[in-house]
C-alpha cells in the first residue's frame, strides 16, 4: 500500500511538518506500507488563477497530481489558521482538483483524489491541537471524492510534544497517530480490492 504523507505548512520549525515526519516514521514500520513523505515547500505552486492556468498547468502541479494519483492512501497534517485550514492547503488542493484541458489523461479533475482514503492529523500550540481546522478540511476532502477516515488526531501543546529526535514524546500521542495510519491503510487496502 502506497501512503502519501504531507503537512500544510512550509514553515521551518512547523509542528505539522514535524508531525508529518513522525507519522511517516511510524508508518515505515507498518508491514506492507510504502511511505512517500512529501514537503509542499519542494513544489513551486503559484496562487491559483484561471488565466495563469490557461497558459498551461504548472509543471509542479502536474508532478503533484501524478504523485497523488499513484497513492491510494493519504495523510494530511493540517495547521489551524483562524479556526480553519491555511490557504496553502486550499490552494494546493484547488490546483490538484483542476482538470488539465490540454491533456486528455487529466480531464477528470478528481483523478488524483477520487476513491483515495485520507486521514487527517493536525498540530497546534493551542490546547485543541488544530481540531477546528479538521472540521473544515473534512468537507473539502469529501468534495474531492476522498473517503475521509473517521478517526483523526489533533496534537495540542505541540511545542512540547516532540523529543530531541523529532519523534512524538508521548506514548498516547504515538498510539493515536498509529490508529489513524492503521485505519487509512486498512480502508485503502479494501477499496483497492473492490
Ligand atoms: C494561527 N494559529 C492558530 N492556532 C490555533 O490553534 N487556532 C487558530 O485559530 C489559529 N489561528 C491562526 C491564524 C493565523 C493567521 C496564524 C498565522 C496562526 C497558530 C498556529 O496554529 C501556529 O502558528 C502553528 O504553529 C502553525 O502550524 P505550523 O506552521 O507550526 O505547522
Image: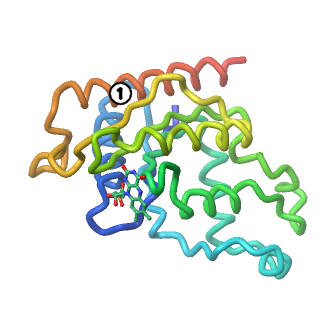
Q: Residues within 10 Å of mark 1 (few under 14, many from 20)?
A: some
Q: Where residue 46 sits in the image (x, y, percent)? A: 63, 76
Q: Where residue 115 sits in the image (x, y, percent)? A: 71, 32
Which residue is rendered at x = 53% and y = 39% of the image? 74
Query: Residue 128, located in which quarter of the rendered image?
Result: top left
Asked if residue 17 is positioned above or below residue 172 in the image, the reply reads: below
Residue highlighted by disc 1: 30
Asked if residue 125 is positioned above or below residue 190 in the image, the reply reads: below
Closer to us: 54 or 191: 54
Query: Number of numbered discs present?
Result: 1
Which residue is rendered at x = 53% and y = 70% of the image? 43
Which residue is rendered at x = 48% and y = 40% of the image? 75
Specify the quadrant that holds the C terminus: top right
Q: Where residue 160 sits in the image (x, y, percent)? A: 15, 47
| Numbered disc 1: secondary structure | loop
Closer to us: 8 or 27: 8
Q: Where residue 158 sits in the image (x, y, percent)? A: 24, 47
Mark 1: C-beta under 8 Å from nearest atom of ligand 1: no
Which residue is rendered at x = 60% and y = 53% of the image? 67
167 displayed left or right of 83: left
Closer to us: 176 or 104: 176
26 displayed left or right of 84: left
Q: Quadrant of ligand 1?
A: bottom left
Amino acid at each position: 500500500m502506497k501512503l502519501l504523507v504531507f503537512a500544510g505548512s512550509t514553515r521551518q520549525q512547523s509542528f505539522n511538518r514535524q508531525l508529518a515526519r513522525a507519522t511517516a516514521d511510524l508508518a515505515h514500520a507498518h508491514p506492507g506500507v510504502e511511505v512517500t513523505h512529501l514537503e509542499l515547500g519542494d513544489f513551486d505552486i503559484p496562487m491559483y488563477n484561471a488565466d495563469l492556468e490557461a497558459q498551461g498547468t504548472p509543471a509542479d502541479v502536474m508532478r503533484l497530481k501524478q504523485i497523488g494519483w499513484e497513492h491510494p492512501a493519504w495523510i494530511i497534517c493540517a495547521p489551524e489558521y483562524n479556526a480553519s485550514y491555511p490557504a496553502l492547503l486550499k490552494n494546493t488542493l484547488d490546483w490538484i482538483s483542476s482538470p488539465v484541458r490540454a491533456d486528455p489523461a487529466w480531464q477528470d479533475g478528481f483523478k488524483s483524489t477520487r476513491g483515495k482514503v485520507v486521514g487527517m492529523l493536525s498540530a497546534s500550540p493551542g490546547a485543541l491541537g488544530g481540531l477546528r481546522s479538521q472540521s473544515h478540511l473534512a468537507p473539502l476532502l469529501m468534495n474531492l471524492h476522498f473517503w475521509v477516515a473517521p478517526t483523526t488526531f489533533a496534537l495540542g501543546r505541540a511545542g512540547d510534544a516532540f523529543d530531541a529526535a523529532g519523534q512524538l514524546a508521548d506514548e498516547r500521542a504515538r498510539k493515536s497517530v498509529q490508529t489513524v495510519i492503521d485505519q487509512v491503510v486498512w480502508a485503502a487496502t479494501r477499496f483497492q480490492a473492490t
